[in-house]
Image: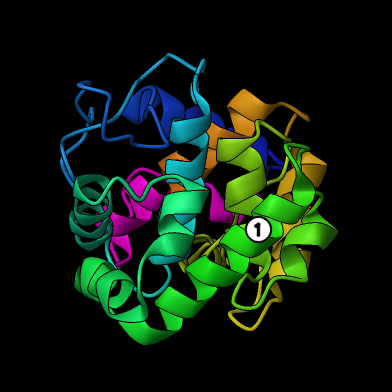
Amino acid sequence: MNGASVLDVYRILSDAYGPQGWWPLLEVRGSQPTATGTLKGYHPGDFSFPRTERQRLEICVGAILTQNTAWPNVEKALLNLERLEALMVTRLLALSDAELEDAVRPSGYFRSKRRKLREWALAHQDWAGRTPSRADLLTVWGIGPETADSIRLYAYGQPEMVVDTYTRRLFAALGWVRETVSYDDLKELCTRELPLDVVVYQEFHALMVEHAKRCYRRQPWRDDLLRDVGGRRGG
């Protein structure tokens, strides 16, 4: 069999792990089907989230806080913000710098993340309830392509493929890309070979993270699940 594609990877991982139920939310009691992250907040097979504006804002805040840290640390910061009733734009902006920094401290880089959250919150007010474009998000200080795509995909249900370090590492190990491949080129590879579908994009991103955590966290890498895929790549 020749010409393995990104869609083949998606199907293999989906069969192996099942629905992942991203983005985790504090109000959701569902559990993660796998055990490499937090066990709370997931909703496998239910793509109706976010259902409220508060949940939408929580996803946006979480997408910013998860930069350069593991999700359990973000969850601690989100719980701190929830206790301050600051998972709403007006309340978040009303916090003092010290209060906001203390709340997000568990996620690391708390001073820069405090600024990023304020910049995003001010921009959010300017958008006045409309769905921000990718270009809108990229003009906000501290929001890069991955964060912008995460916000668009999970908070607003827009078809933006999210790729990350794990995606790059996995595809490089398969011999499909160079390790220096740019974010945009890697994203284009995925969107070219996957259906243009929000559900597929959400599940593929989550599945790639799950599989890479299992097989590509540290060398030597061992990937028994996808070991035959790399050699079947088309030209």
Determine the secondary structure under disc 1. helix
Would residue 101 be seen by someone viewing this image from the given angle?
yes
**Which of the image's four quarters has the N terminus?**
top right
The disc labelled 1 sits on which kind of residue?
Ala
Asked whether, in this view, residue 80 is left or right of residue 153, the answer is left
Q: How many marks?
A: 1
Q: Which residues are magenta?
A: 209-235
- Tell me residue 27's x, y (percent): 27, 27
In the image, residue 171 sits, relative to residue 201, either above or below, namely: below
What residue lies at 42% left-to-right and 57% top-to-bottom? 92
Of the pair 94 and 179, the residue shown nearer to us = 94
Report the residue marked by disc 1.
148
Q: Is residue 83 left or right of residue 208?
A: left
- The reply, left or right, for residue 107 in relation to residue 187 is left
In which image quadrant can residue 148 be found? bottom right
Residue at the spot x=20%, y=55% of the render?
A: 80
Question: Who is closer to the viewer here, 64 or 125?
Answer: 125
Check if residue 107 falls in the magenta segment: no
Residue 235 in view: no
Q: The C terminus is located in which quarter? A: bottom right
Q: Is residue 5 above or below residue 217?
A: above
Magenta stretch holds residue 210: yes
**Position in image of residue 201 (x %, y %):** 62, 36
